[in-house]
Amino acid sequence: MKLVDWFDSAIAGKGSRPVELITQFAQNMSGFNASNPGLSEILVSRKTSSPFLAAMANAAASHVAEQDDVHNGSVFHPATVVFPPALACTQAIGASGEDLLVAAVADYEVGIRVGEFLGRSHYKVFHTTGTAGTLAAAATVGRLLKLNPEQMLNAFGSAGTQSAGLWEFLRDAADSKQLHTAHAASTGLMSAYIAQAGFTDAEHILEGKQGLTAGMSSDSDPSKLIDRLGTCWALAETSFKYYASCRYTHPAADALLQVMLANQLSPKDIAKVETLVHQGAIDVLGPVTDPATVHQSKFSMGTVLALVAHYQFADLQEFDKHFHDDEICAFRERVFMTLDPEVDGAYPQRWIGKVKVHL
C-alpha cells in the first residue's frame, strides 16, 4: 500500500513546472538515449537514466502533490525519499521486489528515528524530509547493496554531512521543496555507493560535537534512535494524507468541516475562523499570507480551510482550479492561527484539531 501510494504521488507530479525542470536536468545530464538506455526509470517521462539521476527526478515528482505519507512524531515524509532510491537501485542491480520492500522498511525506520532524534527545534528552520531523508535514502540503498556495518556507518556519515533543506523558500513561493527530496534521495544513494567502494566519513555524524545535532538542533534526544527498537515498527505509525496540503492544516480542516456539518453552516455564515494550533504550524504556515502558486497555497491555513468550507474537500482538483477564486481568497482572510497550550503540548505525537467559528 505504501508503494502504491508513493507511485500515485509521483505520477501526480507530472507536468508540474519544478518537476519538469529537474526531470529535464536529469535527462540532459544522463548521456543515455533509446539506443543506449540507462538502468533506472524516470517515472514521469518513462525514460531511463542512471540510478542517481532517476532517484533525483522521482523524488522531486513525488513531493509536489502534497499527498505523500507522513509520520507525526518525526514530522517526516518517508515515501518520497524511500522509494525513489530504492526503485532506482533495485532496477540497476537487478534486485527483487522483496529486496526493495525490505530495504524500504529499513529506510522508514532510519528516517523516522533520525527525525524524532532531531526534535522540534530542528523543524523550525529545517525541512526534516530533506535532512533526515539523506540518511534514510542511504539506509535503503545500503541494504540493497548489502553493505557491512562499517560501510553502512560510512554511508550515514556521508549522507549526514550532505543533509539540507531550509523553510525560507515558502516565503517566496519558490520550488525548493522538490529540490529537498531530490537532493536527499540522490545523495543518500550516492553515499551508499561510495561507501561500498571504500569511501570513509564521520563515525559520529548524528551526535558528534560538530555533527547534525550540534548544527541543526537544540533539543535532540538520542533515546529516540533506539526507542522500542525491534518491538515497534515506525512504518506502522505513518499515515496517508486525506487533503492535498501540508499535514499541519488537516486537523483544523477536519474540525471546521465537522462544525459546519453539525450546525448546517455555509461559508457565508462564517465571519471568522480561529484555528488553535501548535508552534510548528505557526512557524511553517505563518509566513504564507497571500499564496501566489498552487503549491504555496497548500501551506496556507486560510486557503485550505476556505476550500474545505466551500467544497467539503481539498484535493488536487480544488487547489488547481480554485485556490485563487475570489470567494476562497475572501474566506482565507477570515482565518487566523492562535497558539494553543493543549495542542502545542500534545505535538508532535498527537496533532489535535481545534477551531473557534465566529458567526
Image (spheres, rainbow, N blue to C red):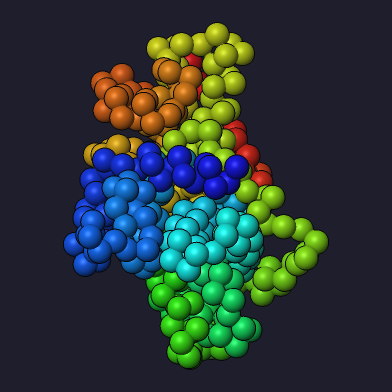
Residue at the location (72% across, 57% down)? 233
**Residue name at image x 40 percent, y 45 percent:** 10
Q: Is residue 244 above or below residue 219?
A: above
- Is 253 displayed left or right of 343 in the figure? left
342 sits left or right of 357 in the view: right
Q: Position of residue 146 (x, y in %)?
A: 59, 76
Residue 288 in view (yes/no): no
Front-most of 309 and 65? 65
Which of the 4 quarters of the picture holds residue 88? bottom left
Is 355 or 298 nearer to us in this picture?
Answer: 298
Q: Whole-percent x and y of residue 284?
A: 42, 51
Q: Residue at x 63, y 84 (%)?
A: 149
Residue 342 in view in this figure: yes
Residue that extends furthest to the left in the rendered view of this protein = 28
Asked whether, in this view, residue 229 is left or right of residue 137, the answer is right
Does residue 172 lie above or below 189 as drawn?
A: above
* Residue 299 found in image quarter: top left
Q: Is residue 234 left or right of residue 272?
A: right
Q: If the image is split into quadrants, where does the N terminus sit?
A: top right
**Quick one: 163 or 273, which is closer to the camera?**
163
Q: Residue furthest top?
A: 264
Q: Residue at x 48, y 68 (%)?
A: 93
Q: Residue farthest to the front?
A: 35
Q: Position of residue 260 (x, y in %)?
A: 54, 16
Seen from the viewer's position, the closer of residues 315 and 102 is 102
